[in-house]
Image (cartoon, rainbow, N blue to C red):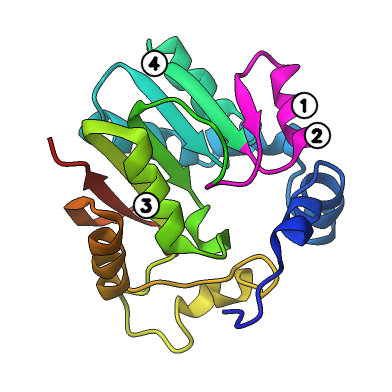
């Protein structure tokens, strides 16, 4: 989507609390961070995520979610017995979430100190990363043997022109640096050292999901 993606320091500014989660969302006529949790519940997105985790996750253990704002998924997983840690690129977003009682580390992933985990989650995140290969390599390093990574991102599996047809206007080349194919996800899994569990999950158009496992 963008052959000249923003550098890390610009991405940190872009995804700040006021610039991205308030001003940019308002400009796009989307809910701000304060209203996102209610949206994810009412539109069914949270339930789809939880169903996917119930289907492929360990049922317990340590969870890392990269790009975890507004924290509603981690709250639900904590209530179900998971030990949860979130990651947000901007410190002001992380502080906002910590004030709500969520364990969130601030920093650019990869490149942040995190514990080993049984379940690694990234929903609507990989397409924003300037280096998907390093992103998934670090996910593999964080996983314990037999640990599972669930990655939801825009994967073009269709015959629409342009890709994703009526939803293509949702993508812009400032935020969305990559759109993927199943072949690309297969190549990424090899580069990252992850086994493919399935490439066929689809939550909605533009919300396709892949599940990977770290070998024992």
Inspect the magenta stretch and tell me whether residue 126 lies in it: no
The residue indicated by pointer 4 is 82
The residue indicated by pointer 2 is 92
Task: Give the residue displayed 60% in from the left and 28% down from the top.
Answer: 71
Tell me whether circle 2 and circle 1 mark residues in contact (CB < 8 Å). Answer: yes
- Label 2: element kind: helix
Which quadrant does the N terminus fall into? bottom right
Query: How far is the residue under mark 3 from the one under mark 4?
Result: 23 Å
User: Is residue 159 toward the left or the right of residue 124 in the image?
Assistant: left
Residue 57, x across and y down, in percent:
26, 30
Eyeballing the image, is 99 above or below 204?
A: above
Residue 99 appears in which quarter of the rendering?
top right
Query: How far is the residue under mark 1 from the one under mark 4?
Result: 21 Å
Question: How busy is the neighbourhood of tag 4: few (under 14 within 10 Å), some, or many (20 plus)?
Answer: many
* The one of 142 and 167 positioned closer to us in this rendering: 142
Which quadrant does the C terminus fall into? top left
Residues in magenta, as a range:
88-110
Query: How far is the residue under mark 4 from the one under mark 2?
Result: 25 Å
Of marks 3 and 1, the one in the foreground: 3
The residue indicated by pointer 1 is 96
Task: Give the residue displayed 48% in from the left and 35% down from the top.
Answer: 65
Residue 17, x across and y down, in percent:
81, 41
Inspect the magenta stretch and tell me whether residue 91 lies in it: yes
User: Is residue 45 toward the left or the right of residue 200 in the image?
Assistant: right
The residue indicated by pointer 3 is 137
Query: How far is the residue under mark 2 from the one under mark 1?
Result: 6 Å
- Label 3: element kind: helix
């Amino acid at each position: 989507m963008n052959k000249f993606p923003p550098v890390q320091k610009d991405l940190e500014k872009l995804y700040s609390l006021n610039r991205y989660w308030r001003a940019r969302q308002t400009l796009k006529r989307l809910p701000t961070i304060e209203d996102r949790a209610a949206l994810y519940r009412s539109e069914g997105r949270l339930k789809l995520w939880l169903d996917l985790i119930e289907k492929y996750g360990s049922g317990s253990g340590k969870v890392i979610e990269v790009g975890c704002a507004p924290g509603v998924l981690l709250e639900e997983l904590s209530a179900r017995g998971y030990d949860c840690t979130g990651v947000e690129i901007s410190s002001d977003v992380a502080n906002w979430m910590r004030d709500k009682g969520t364990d969130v580390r601030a920093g650019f992933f990869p490149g942040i100190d995190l514990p080993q985990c049984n379940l690694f989650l990234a929903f609507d995140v990989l397409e924003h990363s300037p280096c998907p290969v390093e992103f998934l390599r670090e996910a593999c390093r964080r996983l314990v043997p037999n640990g599972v990574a669930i990655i939801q991102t825009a994967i073009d599996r269709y015959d629409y022109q342009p890709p994703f047809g009526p939803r293509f206007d949702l993508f812009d080349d400032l935020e969305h640096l990559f759109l993927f194919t199943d072949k690309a996800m297969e190549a990424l899994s090899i580069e990252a050292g992850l086994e493919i569990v399935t490439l066929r999950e689809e939550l909605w158009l533009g919300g396709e999901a892949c599940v990977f496992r770290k070998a024992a």
